[in-house]
Image (tube, rainbow, N blue to C red):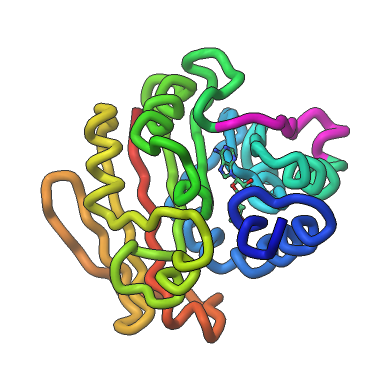
Amino acid sequence: MGFFDNMRKPKGKLGNIQLKSMNKEHTPVSLWGLKHLDISPEDTVLDIGCGGGININRMAKKAGKVYGIDYSEESVKLSKEVNQKEIGEGKVEVLEGNVASLPFEDDTFNIVTAFETVYFWPDIEKCFGEVKRVLKPDGVFLIGMETNGSDNFIMRFWQHFIDMNLYDDSQIRGFLKNNEYSDITVYLRDGKTKQEIIRRMDGSESKVNDDYSQISFSDRFLQWMTVVAKK
Ligand SMILES: C[S@@+](CC[C@H](N)C(=O)[O-])C[C@H]1O[C@@H](n2cnc3c(N)ncnc32)[C@H](O)[C@@H]1O
């Protein structure tokens, strides 16, 4: 298991090191993504592809209960360590499992999140259907990515080495529409113009100045995308 395989499914000691690094390196894009989500104490949340578990921890500060799921044993192990206190308090549960077949009843979650993981999902459209199944009526699905799928040379470089798919916003919207999600909103953060572009389902587009300050040097070359949709 090499460095690149560990992005897709972390394993062993190197996998653990990379997961800890992802907890740190993905912080700016994850916090920016989370800005687009209202989480309240009534909410039950599921984080799919939870990796090192830091986003579970962030959301557990606001939600009633947060579940994390990942098909990597190493990710589950670190997520449990990172959320040890919250697990003890009954606020967090972490499970090993695949997004393709989630071990939850229909209509369970108010919010499902997927940060930096949909690139690896098998048959993504079918997986979006599986996410919809476990969402409550009016539940919200948030997809966070540090690429807009097109003009991102850093992610294109990764793609040469990792078995992954980069999707642009129209592809993601298509997968969601084919599963009959509603209120699909795409947020794009353009590192070059420092603007946030908001694309709505009716085709309208607006721009707001991006006052987001937690951007590292390399993030300036990335075009982040967050997509939020309702069941
Ligand atoms: C690049 S890491 C991102 C981790 C974390 N969400 C973050 O933002 O730092 C991708 C994670 O998705 C998990 N993953 C990939 N495909 C999956 C699948 N089909 N089902 C569940 N987890 C999956 C991997 O094991 C890995 O932990």
- Closer-to-camera residue (201/210): 201
In magenta segment, residue 88:
yes
| Residue at image location 31% in from the left, 75% down from the top | 195
- Closer-to-camera residue (173/184): 173
Q: Is residue 70 above or below residue 30?
A: above
Q: Position of residue 215 (x, y in %)?
A: 52, 78
**Where's the N terminus, which quadrant?**
bottom right
Q: Is residue 58 visible?
A: no
**Total numbered circles:** 0
Q: Is residue 44 visible?
A: yes
| Residue at image location 59% in from the left, 43% down from the top | 49
Q: Position of residue 68 (x, y in %)?
A: 66, 36
Span colored in magenta: 86-98
Q: Position of residue 145 (x, y in %)?
A: 45, 58
| Residue at image location 42% in from the left, 81% down from the top | 221
Left or right side of 84 for 27: left
Q: Position of residue 188 (x, y in %)?
A: 33, 64
Q: Is residue 16 above or below residue 97?
A: below
| Residue at image location 62% in from the left, 37% down from the top | 63
